[in-house]
Image: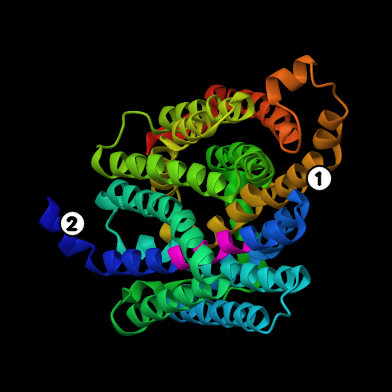
Amino acid sequence: MFRTFLSDCKYLLILWFTQTLSQLGSSMTGFALVLWSYSQYGSALTTALLTICSYAPYVLLSIFAGALSDRWDKKKTMLVCDFLAAVCTLGVLGLWATGGLRMGHLYLINAVNGLMNTVQQPASDVAVSLLTPKEHYQRVGGLRAFSNSLVSLLSPVCAASLYGLWGLGAVIWFDLGTFLIAAAALLLVIRFPRREGQAQKRERVFASAKSGLVYLRSHRGVLNIILFLAVINLTASMFNAALPALLIPKGGEKALGLVQTFAGAASLVGGLLAAALPAPKSRVRVICNSLLFSMSTENFMLALGRGLPVWCLGSALGWLFIPVMNANLDALLRLNIPIEMQGRVYSARNTLQFFTIPLGYLLGGALVDRLFEPFMARQGAESLLCRLFGTGKGAGAALFFLVIGVFGALSCLPARWDRHIWALEKK
């Protein structure tokens, strides 16, 4: 079985490995920029705006990117997008080296990078389907979950180490090196099946984009699970926006890196489980239960915990089953959406599922800076809230984590009773 998998998916495995390496470099740069921006400005909202600028074009233009992706050559699309993103990274390096780097530059560069990712993502998703036989969807989904977990584990540690020793420039040079490896493999080694050229090239862009939305409207199960995940993404993005504001004031930059390292380690274990386990009897049940467990552990332990051991344990529990959820979600969608429609449908999915991410970052950063931190600063040291969440900067973020924990757990319940989502199990 393993030899068959290696033989059937050799090009996919090369693509997976090299793109994972490039993803590690990009994630390290993103983490280093968070450290740099928070050290310069000390604001959760200022730091959160980095991600908002990245996701804004992704949300606004994804639906058209999928239509273009189905018309364009997948390899060329991925190469051009990677090249332009690398040029933006070089721009950051140049500005930093000359002492001219400002948050405005980063916002603009992140927006351009977000646009490149918008076009590349549907091409990459379809490429996985083109290079993977259907019988290997579960295993490949597990591998992708594993690699995402590995990146989550390594990027904060590696980025913090390079940043601490040699500064932001060292992290960016590593990022550029991984880009060159991934681009060379994609250009010189990986071959795509000829069938990708059969995508509907004569269909107009607007008509093609509309067809993705029409497909979702007529397939309520796929649409409803996408909308469910949009709510989950709202909670998760508020969490991510508030995390530096909780951990850096209370434990420093090392605390933020260590907590994210534990999240990556737990995700790594979950990714191994997702790759090794057979297909479950009910993918929908796995998705719902995994998200409910995550929302019901990490947020509350970060809110009420008073030190690194509790924060790290909560982070590990929160991320342990996320790769298993992602692998089953990936397989569920690929089994229900025809390959020739995946570019357009995935792009419509990206718009609907991910539009809550910039909203969540904006809300999370603004609520922590403007509401929760000032509110906790007004409380007496002997008040119940200060006994629960502490005093000083970071106490408001802790209270905020309790709020999003309750919201996240409750948001997992309606999907368990949605008959349209359960109907996806039939394929």
- Label ID, residue 366: 1
- Quadrant containing the C terminus in the rendered view: top left
The reply, left or right, for residue 151 in relation to residue 395 is left
Residue 119 is situated, as x and y percent measured from the top left of the image, at 57, 70
Q: Quadrant of residue 31?
A: bottom right
Residue 333 is situated, as x and y percent measured from the top left of the image, at 45, 47
Q: Looking at the image, which residue is at 65% across and 49% down?
A: 352
Q: Looking at the image, which residue is at 62% across and 52% down?
A: 214
Position of 119 relative to 97 (above/below): above
Q: Quadrant of residue 249?
A: top right
The answer to whether residue 83 is seen in the rendering is: yes
The answer to whether residue 341 is seen in the rendering is: no
Give the residue number, with chain letter if any, for mark 2: 5
The reply, left or right, for residue 125 in relation to residue 301 is left
Q: Amino acid at mark 1?
A: Ala
Residue 182 is situated, as x and y percent measured from the top left of the image, at 38, 75
Q: Amino acid at mark 2?
A: Phe
- Label ID, residue 143: none
Q: Looking at the image, which residue is at 80% across and 16% down?
A: 383
Kindly report the secondary structure that dominates the magenta region of the rendered protein. helix
Q: How is the image coloured?
A: rainbow
Q: Nearer the viewer, residue 126 or 3?
A: 3
Which span of residues is magenta-colored? 23-33
